[in-house]
Image: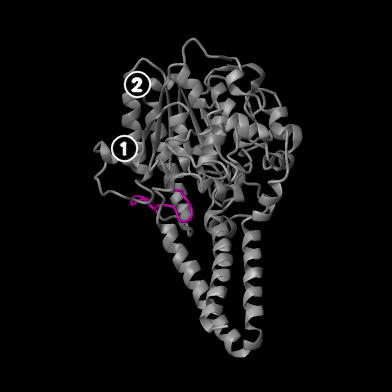
Amino acid sequence: MSYYVILFILFIGLLAYISARWAIQYFGLSCFEQIVFHLKVPLEGANPQFLIDWVKLCFIKALVIALVAAGVICFVFYDIAAILSYGALVVLLILAMQEVGIFGWIINLFRKTNFYEENYVDASKVKLTFPERKRNLIHIYVESLENTYSSVEKGGNYKDDLLYPISDYALENVHFSHKENLGGAKELSGTGWTTGGLVGQSAGIPLLVPLNCKRFSESQPFFPGLTALGDILKAKGYQLEYLIGSDAAFGGRQSYFKDHGDFKIFDLRYAKEHGFLAKDYKEFWGYEDRKLFDFAKSELLELTKSEDPFYFAMLTVDTHHPYGYVDAQCKEQYSERLSNVIACDIKELSEFLDWLKQQDFYEDTTVVISGDHLSMAAGYIHSTYDKSYERTTFNCFLNSAVQPLQPYNREFVTLDMFPTVLASMGVTIEGDRLNLGTNLFSDKKTLVETYGFTYVDKELRKQSTYYKQHIMK
């Protein structure tokens, strides 16, 4: 066996293993289903930085190790070179697959569940009673916002409160927590990345698509059997808009918001096409949050010119893993780059909220702030925070039309945000359940309070005939 064949075999194995370990750290992969989903959706508009980092941290590293190892095998263990090379390849591939959780995913391909048949409450069949004067809704999804970033005194796990003053807004207004102070929702499989988080919170289901499903595109509807918040509010005469600082096509977000409410989508492309940005403008994933909040102000003022109520959803980006975006106006207060980014982004968000409170439409508007999912910046999280701390996504309801019966010491997941957001607008939900979500303003038990988080997560990862035949089709 020649040196170059040995080199190639070792390089492939090493590249697979090193890339798998890197992906876990870099992307914070929550489950293998996350990889499967992204194989089925458009990826244009992705930040190219990850490819540069992969070449530097994986490709070159694997090549260097393979060059050395191939030399040793070829000249020292030549008689058993084939056995060692192929043996190393098999071991490295197995370790790589174990790292990304492919074995658990394969096992679940052969497991069936009736969890949906027994617990899914089709939102299209639930009686919803809106108040006579419909309230506006602004839902601000903050990238990777979790309670971990707050101070220990308030319920977080940092030396200072990176979430100030938003943390105080939560504790002084409506906030749902799994404990006595700042806390929030746990994260089920299928909700741990942006699209999964958005769908989970606005439609009450996880994104756990089978490998053999069709690729999502403009010609392929996004879960046509699903009734989401956008569908409900569109049918009630709401104006719908989704504002985002990147290309909405990435990850299937455009397909979801178009197919479930026909939202006006203000993304990077729209901003350039309509003169908000120069044609060649590109910062981070598209444009920074400082501009996003400015665009939000102008879009909201435009929406208020109509007599119809509006649902305005927006997603920030500056705190995106792995490094975040350092705005030119940010102060360097902490030793960790992401800590500075988080504190700066929260300051910009609080300034936007101050502006909102001064507007005439604010009195008739419910504002929801939530993290789209837990942070994927695994390196930052593991090196900065206590590993035993229970991480949860942030939530805060401002100007809620109703008050909760028991906001603290609740066990819930991000899927429960779907009916909860609707209830915060003064909508009465018959049975207080929508899809897999439970209205947290009520005293009805959530699914994880009923069955336990581990059981629910385990069942949802299994194969569901109902999910495939009634929700996806």
- Please tell me whether residue 261 is drawn above or below residue 235 in the rendered image: below
Q: Which residue is mark 2?
A: 304
Quarter location, residue 310: top left
Residue 424 vs 411, above or below: the answer is above
Q: Is residue 112 magenta?
A: no
Magenta stretch bounds: 319-331
> What crowding class fits label 2: few (fewer than 14 Cα within 10 Å), some (14-19), or many (20 or more)?
some
In the displayed structure image, the side of residue 346 where residue 100 appears, left or right: right
Farthest-out residue, bottom: 76
Front-most of 194 and 360? 194
Image quarter in which the N terminus is found: bottom right
Q: Nearer the viewer, residue 136 or 364?
A: 136
- Taking depth in this image into account, of 8 and 204 the one nearest to the observer is 8
Q: Position of residue 254 (x, y in %)?
A: 42, 37
Of the numbered discs in the image, which one, if any, rests on residue 270?
Answer: 1
**Which residue is most to the front?**
1
Residue kind at label 1, given as amino acid type: Tyr
Q: CA distance from mark 2 to mark 1?
A: 20 Å
